[in-house]
Image (cartoon, grey):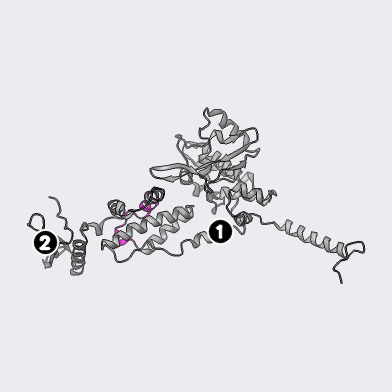
């Protein structure tokens, strides 16, 4: 028998009946007249105490006023979100809608979807957001995931299921500020040398299912070119010039509607990145095996697109980096490693900025931190300069 639903705006009468001797002795009941058929309808549920029974009646009365499914209050977030998603996202354009839906499917539902709507708290959302940040999700990814959750929970407020929206967080972006502050000491986030990178790549391959060598190639290429994992996933044969050994970065693989999709680079502009000698044999071998210019250089074991999350899960990343003593290392730190090495190698900041694709020179300058030897050399250079000024044959202007 189908459970009767409350029509919008219907008037209801309520009562609580006490039936001693039963496991749930308090039966709460709502009654109403169906405006379409004129028939008298009812719905009831048994509870352990009168407070629970009254709370259920209150929810039924709110549901009747708003035309909400009476059982929506006990729905899990995933189920409720799917039922109201069209309403919650009304008015959004496609370019905004796609990342919102991707955030809902890939982050919100796996993290919070199992909880009933009324049990979604500010603390639960806060922990979810910080978990996404810890996994290496970018600022815009977390923002889009929270935005769709805010809209769904706002609909729950309008439906009378909850009193306030618990998804409206403040302060979560400070996590990114702290991460950016860490760049004042780039060596704390970079691998120390090429040997450490090769060791990491080999360990990830060894830990992966079937010992797929492609994971090690992705890691080596990402660090050696200071590229994002999404950009490594997006590279095609036609993007590589073997005469100059330059890679033209044109696209990145990212989360979109229906799964992983390719789109333009983060800076919306193509840029060129050098392919160093250490990478050329591997890249050359891959180019030789690809027939078409639009063929991908880096794919998963089954030929699919890769992402930072796919790389993490397929290689048991967290376990591997921990066992090697690199507990801090995230997939994005491969890019940080490459930029740090280039800065230490003396690449001029304006060139490093072009390779990195940074919009601001200040972002690039974070990588230009001299080591102790450079600082001592600067002091020695100043002393030498001052000695020259004091010398009888040195410049004397401006000296009292």
For the residue labelled by badge 1, is the local secondary structure a helix, a strand or a loop?
helix
Q: Position of residue 47 (x, y in %)?
A: 18, 64
Which label sits on residue 238?
A: none
The prevailing secondary structure element of the residues shown in magenta is helix
Q: Which residue lies furthest to the right in this view?
A: 392
Q: Which of marks 1 and 2 is nearer the N terminus?
A: 2
Hey, which quadrant is residue 241 in on the image? top right
Position of the C terminus by quadrant? bottom right
Q: Does the magenta stretch include residue 269?
A: no
308 and 161: which is toward the camera: 161
Q: Which residue lies furthest to the bottom in this view?
A: 400
Q: Where is residue 373 in the image (x, y as percent from the top left)?
A: 73, 56
85 and 80: which is toward the camera: 85
Query: Is the residue marked by circle 1 packed among few (<14), some (14-19), or many (20+) residues within 10 Å?
Result: some
Q: In this view, does 396 lie above or below 341?
A: below
Q: Where is residue 174 in the image (x, y as percent from the top left)?
A: 50, 62
Q: Please give the range of residues in magenta.
A: 105-120
Q: Please give left or right for residue 362 compared with residue 115 in the image.
A: right
Residue tagged 1: 180
Q: Where is residue 279 in the image (x, y as percent from the top left)?
A: 62, 38
Disc nearest the viewer among 1 and 2: 2
Residue tagged 2: 32
Q: Which residue is drawn at 92% across and 64% down?
A: 392
Q: Residue at x 59, y 57 (%)?
A: 183
The answer to whether residue 132 of the structure is visible from this angle is yes
Query: Is the residue marked by circle 2 packed among few (<14), some (14-19), or many (20+) residues within 10 Å?
Result: some
């Amino acid at each position: 028998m189908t459970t009767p639903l409350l029509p919008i705006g219907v008037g209801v009468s309520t009562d609580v009946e006490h039936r001693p001797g039963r496991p749930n002795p308090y039966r709460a009941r709502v009654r109403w007249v169906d405006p379409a058929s004129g028939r008298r309808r009812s719905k009831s549920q048994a509870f352990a105490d009168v407070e629970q029974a009254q709370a259920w009646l209150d929810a039924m009365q709110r549901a009747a006023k708003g035309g909400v499914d009476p059982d929506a209050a006990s729905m899990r977030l995933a189920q409720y979100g799917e039922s109201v998603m069209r309403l919650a996202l009304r008015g959004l354009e496609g370019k905004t809608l796609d990342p919102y839906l991707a955030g809902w499917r890939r982050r919100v539902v796996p993290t919070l979807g199992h909880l009933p709507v009324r049990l979604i708290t500010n603390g639960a959302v806060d922990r979810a957001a910080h978990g996404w940040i810890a996994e290496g999700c970018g600022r815009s990814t977390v923002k889009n995931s929270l935005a769709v959750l805010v809209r769904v929970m706002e609909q729950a407020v309008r439906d009378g299921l909850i009193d306030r929206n618990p998804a409206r967080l403040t302060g979560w972006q400070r996590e990114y500020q702290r991460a950016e502050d860490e760049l004042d000491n780039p060596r704390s986030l970079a691998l120390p040398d090429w040997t450490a990178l090769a060791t990491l790549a080999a360990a990830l391959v060894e830990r992966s299912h079937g010992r797929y060598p492609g994971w090690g190639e992705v890691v080596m290429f990402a660090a050696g070119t200071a590229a994002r994992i999404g950009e490594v996933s997006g590279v095609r044969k036609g993007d590589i010039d073997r005469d100059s050994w330059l890679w033209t970065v044109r696209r990145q693989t990212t989360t979109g509607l229906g799964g992983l999709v390719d789109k333009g680079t983060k800076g919306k502009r193509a840029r060129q990145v050098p392919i160093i000698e250490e990478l050329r044999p591997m890249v050359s071998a891959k180019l030789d095996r690809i027939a078409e210019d639009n063929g991908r250089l880096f794919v998963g074991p089954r030929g699919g697109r890769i992402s930072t999350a796919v790389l993490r899960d397929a290689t048991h990343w967290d376990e591997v980096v921990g066992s090697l003593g690199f507990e801090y290392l995230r997939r994005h730190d491969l890019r940080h490693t490459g930029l740090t090495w280039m800065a230490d190698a003396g690449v001029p900041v304006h060139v490093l900025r072009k390779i990195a694709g940074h919009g601001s020179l200040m972002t690039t300058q974070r990588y230009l931190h001299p080591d102790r030897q450079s600082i001592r050399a600067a002091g020695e250079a100043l002393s030498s300069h001052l000695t020259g000024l004091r010398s009888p044959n040195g410049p004397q202007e401006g000296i009292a």
